[in-house]
Amino acid sequence: MHISLDSALGRQRRLNSVGESVLQIAPSAAAAYSLRSLTGGDPKVVRVRRSSNNGEQDFTAASISSGALVNFVNEIQTLGTVTNSSGNNGFTLTNTSSTGFTATTDTATGVCGWPYTAKAGDKITVSFDAVVRSGTPQFLPRRATALSSNNLASVVSDSPLSVNSTASYSFEFTYDDDQAGSLTFSEGDDNADFDISNFQVTSFKGAGFVETWYDQSGNGNDAVQATAGSQPKIVNAGSLVVLSDVPALLFDESFFVATGFAFSPSGDFLAVTASKLSSNNFIDTRDGGSDGFFIQQGGSDVRYRYNGDGSIDVSGNDQHIVATAELNGTTLTAYKNGSSAGTDTVTAGLSTTTALSIGKVAFSSANTLTGSVQEIILYDTDKSANRAVLETNIISHYGIS
């Protein structure tokens, strides 16, 4: 579900009833990741890369709710002067500019257009005026303006727009290929003689990916993913990704690694998370197969495992839940939406050194996550006295029943 969040976020609470933020309720977190403010201020929460030109920018919690993030992702690219295909494959062009041209051809291979970067799922609208003196030219986004069978392959599922009369045109389409490279006119038949004017992109709805999920604990344990293909999505087809009307990160076999941060408490700990998991590993701290701690969506259950000798399965297949794991002495307890969902006796103490992973196995590239994630707060000390109020705050904020 994708909506404007100005009103939705306005009714969600950042503070509890006495004015405390989440990290004032329970301070000294080892790491705290969220798209809302956990501090009571307005910290930067994410660094976002837009699909159109790979530009990146930091955003605070307030700039997400204000629409600044979506505006950044959907910024319309500037068009340069129209580009003609080379050699015999081009039109005879005159009056070329960033908004139009006059084209003539007496062959079946005329093509020209404007370079324009887009990715699969991006939506775009263009408008222009045409004067057609002969022929039936066509407009369609392509891989490039240079003529070849590969470059001219369609990158949208829509049919070409036939410019068959003198008129004003508007064309809305969705890209289905990551190789989109141009907004292109072709001759459409053996001969074409026409003018294009007032060409403009009136709407671009792109994708935004999170390169950094900033740690709000003050410890600098930011979750970073520099590889574009592994970054979770925060804007999809021009709209903010939301879960129950509140911002979320969409994982589609993408993942984060918290650079340099090994979550390895020697004793008691608390992990409180808000997510909707479909499959595979959510948070993982392990050096190998049996050591460390992880939460995953396994079949119909959310699975909590600790050091190979503690395992608790909680019913929750593809549900929006607060999943909490708490170690108190040698008792591991799993909570779902604030209620105990099972316990196990474990050998206390972690000694892992692998960086915390969000969205896959920590020690390999296996079990990449599909699902939506909103918040992860980790404590490497006893926070059992704060657990209930933390869960209540998170359940209220994210509208979890």
Image (cartoon, grey):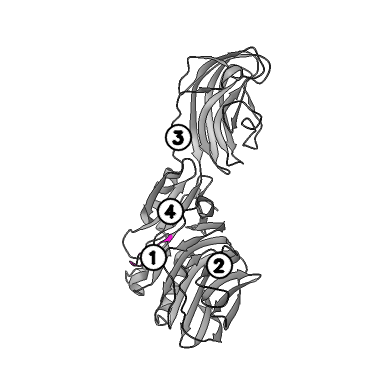
SS for tag 2? loop
What's the CA distance linking mark 2 and mark 1? 18 Å
What's the CA distance linking mark 4 and mark 2? 37 Å
What's the CA distance linking mark 3 and mark 4? 29 Å
| Residue named by callout 3 | 77
Q: What's the magenta bit mostly, secondary-structure-wise?
A: loop
Q: Where is residue 350 in the image (x, y as percent from the top left)?
A: 47, 80
The answer to whether residue 249 is above or below residue 323 is: above
| Residue named by callout 4 | 7
Circle nearer the N terminus (1, 3): 3
Circle nearer the N terminus (2, 1): 1
Image: magenta residue range = 215-223
Q: Which of 226 and 156 is in front in this view?
A: 226
Q: Position of residue 359 (x, y in %)?
A: 53, 63
Q: What residue type is labelled 1?
A: Asn
Numbered disc in front, either 1 or 4: 1
